[in-house]
């Protein structure tokens, strides 16, 4: 090979490898938006239809043709891993589905001269594309004030001031119960209880534990297949929810610096109490139930109660041939209304910058991406997406008074009844902790405390020390 030919080949390879080099800048397409997601097929179909309509509307209004690439990437952890590996090579989406913990990780990679995540507040009141503009994308022209406050607030608890994630659809936890079996139990437990729904909607945490204790004394009396009164789907949510409702330190942020606070005597006493419940046979968790969700245990009539996310509540429906299912909010620990709040989960969107592209291209993509996010979260579109999700709740308050969704909440089928409990009983009462690099690890590791202590694999002190060490390593 001649030196001249070799030089040409090397130059060609360099052009192919570095999109933002002088070789590649002409190939930048500012009108191409990459949207990485985790949606299941039912949601993806609806979102794709909304994306197609957005492309058409945008071209009609601006005269510009745009392309939105909606790309499935697997689960949340897969997207996190791909984005973190993509920073160095420029393989970054414009919009990504993300947990707030993961957005916090992206922000932790930033420096004074390099940013990865856009502050969405900069778009809220933009003179051209803000919430109050472009009626064709947001017919009500309602803005941030129309979002469920705790849902929007979730996106503002990062190490930087601003809002770096926007809710698309959300879920919480509910208590499901086998109404047929519970009626038999209550006839023995307290025959004065005649309205099971009213009783379960008002039961306190201590009263609920007493009821579980009564059932556990003679499981076989209430069903030959019963293995436990209750299955809790998430060890991490169990720990974090109990911790918040008991006002026990978990994580905090001071002067922009995150702090891991969960290794304390109050938290250890809490876990000791939960361990006592487990040893009494009152409950199983996912981590102590062969790492299986409670839905199979529940539909197989192996438990009477299960607590899990409304995002997967449909798996607990035994169908027409099964038993009657009751639905209630999870009994709260505290009587203090400020502590009677619940975990919030679900789909959040973040807007990202690809530092392998020019500022002009990034800013144009960001503005188009923001308009798509505004479109997907407008009242009617948000309802359509959530109704396709089989369990997630809309993020705007106006959605709940919309005739379509209000009618849905009045239906007697299983999923509308779940949604009704979330809308009418939890009613926006969600807690939000600060998020920073390390909170994702904290969540996993406190879940591990529950699992390991309940199984007897570690003492309480050992479990807390290990969880703290593992979390600190990942901060």
Image: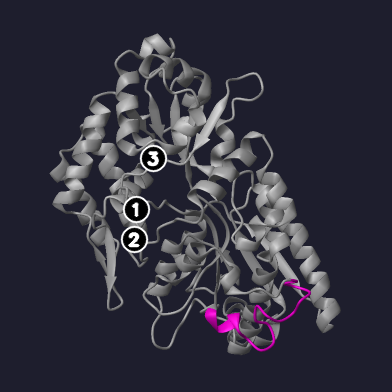
Left or right? Give the position of 411 relative to 254. Answer: right
Report which quarter residue 129 is drawn in: bottom right
Mark 1 closeness class: few <14, some 14–19, many ≥20 residues within 10 Å: many
Asked which secondary structure carries label 2, the reply is helix
Secondary structure category for the residue under label 3 = loop
Is the stretch drawn in magenta largely helix, strand or loop? loop
Q: Earlier in the sequence, mark 3 or mark 1?
A: 3
Q: Are marks 3 and 1 in contact (CB under 8 Å)?
A: no
Which label sits on residue 390?
none
In the rendered image, which residue does mark 1 sit on?
Answer: 443
> Label 2, on which residue?
439
Residue 153 or residue 445, whichever sits in front: 153
Q: Please name the residue shown 39% across and 87% down the image.
A: 112
Tell me how far mark 1 sits from mark 2, CA to CA: 6 Å
Determine the CA span between mark 3 and mark 1: 22 Å
Q: Which residue is labeled 3 in the image?
A: 331
The one nearer the camera, 303 or 403, is 403
């Amino acid at each position: 090979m001649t030196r001249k030919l070799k030089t040409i080949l090397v130059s060609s390879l360099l052009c192919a490898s570095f999109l933002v080099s002088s070789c590649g800048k002409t190939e930048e397409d500012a009108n191409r938006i990459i949207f990485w997601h985790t949606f299941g097929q039912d949601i993806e179909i609806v979102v794709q239809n909304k994306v197609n309509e957005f492309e058409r509307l945008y071209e009609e209004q601006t005269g510009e043709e745009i392309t939105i690439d909606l790309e499935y990437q697997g689960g949340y952890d897969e997207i996190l891993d791909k984005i973190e590996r993509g920073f160095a090579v420029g393989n970054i989406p414009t919009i990504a589905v993300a947990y707030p913990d993961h957005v916090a990780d992206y922000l932790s990679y930033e420096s004074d001269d390099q940013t990865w995540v856009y502050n969405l507040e900069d778009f809220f009141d933009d003179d051209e594309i803000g919430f109050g503009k472009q009626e064709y994308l947001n017919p009500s022209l309602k803005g941030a004030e129309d979002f469920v406050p705790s849902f929007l607030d979730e996106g503002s608890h990062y190490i930087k001031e601003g809002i770096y994630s926007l809710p698309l659809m959300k879920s919480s936890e509910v208590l499901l119960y086998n109404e047929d079996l519970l009626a038999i139990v209550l006839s023995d437990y307290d025959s004065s209880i005649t309205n099971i729904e009213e009783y379960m909607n008002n039961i306190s945490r201590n009263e609920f534990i007493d009821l579980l204790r009564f059932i556990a004394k003679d499981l076989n009396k209430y069903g030959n297949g019963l293995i436990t009164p209750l299955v809790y789907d998430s060890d991490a949510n169990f720990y974090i929810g109990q911790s918040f409702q008991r006002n026990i330190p978990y994580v905090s942020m001071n002067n922009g610096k995150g702090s891991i606070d969960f290794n304390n005597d109050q938290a250890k006493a809490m876990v000791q109490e939960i361990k006592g419940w487990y040893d009494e046979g009152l409950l199983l968790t996912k981590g102590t139930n062969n790492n299986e969700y409670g839905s199979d245990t529940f539909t197989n009539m192996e438990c009477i109660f299960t607590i899990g996310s409304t995002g997967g509540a449909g798996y607990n429906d035994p169908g027409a041939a099964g038993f009657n299912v009751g639905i209630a909010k999870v009994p709260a620990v505290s009587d203090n209304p400020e502590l009677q709040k619940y975990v919030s989960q679900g789909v959040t969107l973040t807007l990202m910058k690809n530092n392998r592209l020019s500022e002009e291209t990034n800013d144009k993509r960001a503005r188009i991406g923001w308009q798509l996010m505004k479109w997907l979260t407008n009242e009617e579109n948000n309802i359509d997406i959530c109704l396709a999700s089989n369990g997630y709740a809309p993020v705007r308050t106006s959605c709940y008074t919309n005739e379509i969704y209000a009618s849905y909440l009045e239906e007697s089928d299983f999923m509308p009844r779940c949604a009704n409990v979330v809308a009418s009983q939890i009613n926006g009462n969600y807690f939000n902790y600060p998020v920073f690099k390390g909170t994702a690890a904290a969540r996993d590791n406190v879940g591990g405390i529950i699992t390991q202590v309940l199984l007897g694999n570690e003492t309480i002190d050992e479990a807390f020390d290990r969880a703290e060490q593992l979390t600190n390593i990942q901060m």
